[in-house]
Image: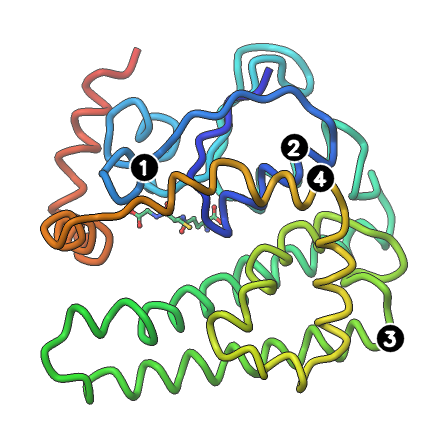
Amino acid sequence: MIDVYYWPTPNGWKVTIMLEECGLDYRVVPVDIGGGDQFKPEFLRICPNNRMPAVVDHDPLGGGDPLSMFESGAILEYLADKTGRFLPASGAQRYKVLQWVHWQMANLGPMMGNANHFKNYAKNIVEDPSQLEYGRNRFVGEVDRLSGVMDAQLSANQFLAGAEYSIADIITWPWAMLLGRLIDESVWESFPNLKRWVDELHARPAVEKGWRLHREWGKRELTDAQERARRELLFNQTNEKVRKAREEAARLAP
Ligand SMILES: N[C@@H](CCC(=O)N[C@@H](CS)C(=O)NCC(=O)O)C(=O)O
């Protein structure tokens, strides 16, 4: 059994889609990131970076004690090795897949996260909206560039790493499918190969199921005060603020 520490966001969906694709048994542990669950000692012991997703595998590859892991890229690579699915065990194709996995982790995810911040969230935080212009242009520009990288790759290949569906696709889809919502639905006209791939993957039952899992959690109506508290929690993190929670987690460690 695998415990998956999850909230319905693109980084969370990567893991639930992979678990569904592999047909693995899993149990969902909610991590309400707007409510501060990522700072709870029991979660920080699993993920000292106070970010979900994370997993604990009670029957780990190779045996031994339960294995806990954070970072979605590492989690997908582990699950692929555990099941022998969606990542060749060796050879050139393994590294082609991993190259796109690392590309997503270092590029598309962070750039889309920052573009979303400057475009959608930050306007409720800063008093002078002109402060946002540089950040918004910088990150939306990067997302546009990265969309072109995917579109070119998918113009010559059915999937990101070539002819086979792999963890490179599973890890990239949850972010890429949000491009229209982030930029504008007309963005798809510029990236027809990317759109073809987004739609083809969406037709896979495991993708649909992993993506829909507990969507209702992220759609609660919040009061203004709750919204403010959520913003303070998510967008104002410093070492000093997180340090105390980390120390408490270390103190409680077995
Ligand atoms: N590189 C990490 C990113 C994880 C991440 O940023 N998770 C966000 C939600 S999508 C989170 O937990 N945020 C909580 C916070 O900002 O405190 C991964 O891919 O696992």
Q: Which mark is in front, 2 or 4?
A: 4
The answer to whether the residue labelled 3 contacts the one labelled 1, judged by CB atoms less than 8 Å apart, is no
The picture places residue 233, in percent across and down from the top left corner, at 18, 49
The picture places residue 144, in percent across and down from the top left corner, at 55, 82
Residue with the most extreme front position: 221
Mark 2 element type = helix
- Earlier-in-chain disc, 3 versus 1: 1
Which residue was labeled with disc 1?
32
Which residue was labeled with disc 2?
19
- Earlier-in-chain disc, 1 versus 4: 1
Circle 4 packing at 10 Å, graded few (<14), some (14-19), many (20+), is some
Q: Residue at x 63, y 18 (%)?
A: 60
How far is the residue under mark 3 from the one under mark 1? Answer: 40 Å
Left/right placement of residue 181 relative to residue 45 reads: right
Circle 2 packing at 10 Å, graded few (<14), some (14-19), many (20+), is many
- Three-letter amino acid code at the position of disc 1: Asp
Q: Which mark is in front, 4 or 3?
A: 4
- Earlier-in-chain disc, 4 versus 3: 3
- Earlier-in-chain disc, 2 versus 3: 2
Which residue was labeled with disc 4?
206
Mark 3 element type = helix
How far is the residue under mark 1 from the one under mark 4? Answer: 23 Å
How far is the residue under mark 4 from the one under mark 3? Answer: 25 Å
Mark 4 element type = helix
- Three-letter amino acid code at the position of disc 4: Ala
Q: Nearer the viewer, residue 40 or 193?
A: 193
Which residue was labeled with disc 3?
156
Q: Residue at x 76, y 79 (%)?
A: 152
How far is the residue under mark 2 from the one under mark 4? Answer: 8 Å
